[in-house]
Amino acid sequence: MGGAVSAGEDNDDLIDNLKEAQYIRTEKVEQAFRAIDRGDYYLDGYRDNAYKDLAWKHGNIHLSAPCIYSEVMEALKLQPGLSFLNLGSGTGYLSTMVGLIIGPFGVNHGVELHTDVVEYAREKLEDFIKNSDSFDKFEFCEPVFVVGNCLEISADSHQYDRIYCGAGVQKDHENYMKVLLKIGGILVMPIEDQGFALYAADPDNQDWPVLMESKNILAVSFAPLVQQSRADGEKPDTVELPSLTVRSLQDLSRVYIRRTLRDLDSEDSAGKEAVQRVPQKRKRRRCQRRRINTYVCRQPADPQMGRVRRRNTLRKSKKKWRTRRRKETSAILKSSSKRTC
């Protein structure tokens, strides 16, 4: 199963290839895939194949091909606050990605047949919460895994908004799966060898859930759901799904404190990117302007004309001086004659 896209060198490279091939089409699904490294769910020594579009199985541990998970995530049309049930939850890889989208007010349950696989899934979940750099960037709905047979779920169990079955469903069990779906919900499951079937529960349709889409993704072949074998008269081991509990005040406080800190960090990061570095203004030196008097001396073209002008100027000056002296002398004589009279 798989092989639809080129192999990547790392998780981001794999996601780029899935986007290019149109398996990942929405931003929220892309963010969930990038936040969780697929290689972290592989055993040591097998990680070289983690970023190829191939399924992987080791003992009871199984991972579907990345293109399958991409189609499932897109088909579920996940939204914050929805309830999700994963039948055949395996390593918890898909459930953890779903938890990043439905957020802290959603419901995230998984049922897995093998006890060792459930323990493996819980270890990987704890490792993601404690060590992943992506955990603090999302509001997370932590998956809850239980051990049990998916075909033995209690008849009075609650219903879910979104359901995915990771094993082949026989025609005889098709209606059994639909009973777990809420009105308006979506159920995605592989029907025998026919590919994926997408069911939607339409409240306006009396025959809900109705088949909305049947899609054959490559050569999809899932191992069938395991039916519990029991002796005649033996009662089956009924699977009790986790209860729907209301969050405590302490949990709600933690959610809103983390949200506030995340928003503040985002605003701070955005502000640092937006602020441009302004060059420091240079202190202007006060300019003291000095007044310069410029004297222009003109040299006449004809030296002889220069001497004539100077002589005439001198004569005029002497004439003015004599006229002024005569006026002053006349004024003195008139003044003295008046006194003698």
Image (tube, grey):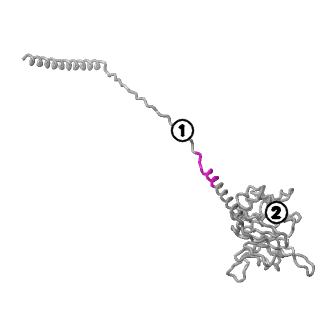
Image coordinates for residue 317, horizontal then vertical, percent: 23, 19
Dot 1: what SS? loop
* Residue positioned 68% across, 80% down in the render: 203
Q: Is residue 291 magenta?
A: no
Does residue 75 appear anywhere in the picture? no
How many numbered discs, if any?
2
* Residue positioned 80% across, 71% down in the render: 87
The residue type indicated by label 1 comes to Arg
Q: Which of the two residues, 214 or 178, is positioned nearer the viewer here?
A: 178
Dot 2: what SS? helix
Find the magenta span and give its range: 267-277
Q: Which residue is mark 1?
A: 282
Q: Is residue 145 above or below residue 268?
A: below
Of all residues, the one furthest to the bottom in this rendering is 206
The tag earlier along the polypeptide, 1 or 2, is: 2
Q: Which residue is mark 2?
A: 122
* Residue positioned 70% across, 58% down in the render: 137
